[in-house]
Image (cartoon, helix red, strand yellow):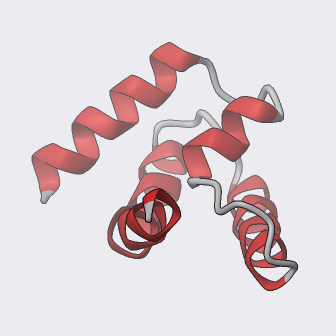
Amino acid sequence: MANDVEKELSRKYCPRFGQIAAERGYVSAERVKQALAEQIDDDLAERPHRLIGRIFLDKGWMTPEQIDEVLNEVFRRN
């Protein structure tokens, strides 16, 4: 159930999350693509779904503060 909620959040917000993170210079466009590919690989391998921000955090590409800033922007634009 929780995984379904995360997948729905990903469909709705992850493309914007990655775009905003790249616009702010927190990650490169290439890293956004890598994170999206990793997310898809996880889903296809039936591993737990991870949000793009979680992947950025796990890889050390963004700080928790940067993730909070991007999320605030995502929800402001929505």
Q: At 48% across and 29% down in the image, what residue appears? A: 67
**In the drawing, does residue 78 fall left or right of residue 23?**
left
Residue 67, compared with residue 21, is above or below; it is above
Q: Position of residue 59 (x, y in %)?
A: 83, 34
**In the drawing, does residue 31 fall left or right of residue 75?**
right
Q: Name the quadrant of the C terminus.
A: bottom left
Q: Name the quadrant of the N terminus.
A: bottom left
Q: At 80% across and 66% down in the image, what residue appears? A: 47
Q: Quadrant of residue 36?
A: bottom right
Residue 55, compared with residue 37, is above or below; it is above
Q: Residue furthest bottom?
A: 44
Q: Position of residue 57 (x, y in %)?
A: 69, 31
**In the drawing, does residue 36 fall left or right of residue 23?**
right
Q: Position of residue 46 (x, y in %)?
A: 79, 76
61 vs 47, nearest the viewer: 47
Q: At 69% across and 40% down in the image, what residue appears? A: 56
68 vs 7, nearest the viewer: 7
Q: Position of residue 43 (x, y in %)?
A: 73, 77
> How many marks are shown on the rendered structure?
0
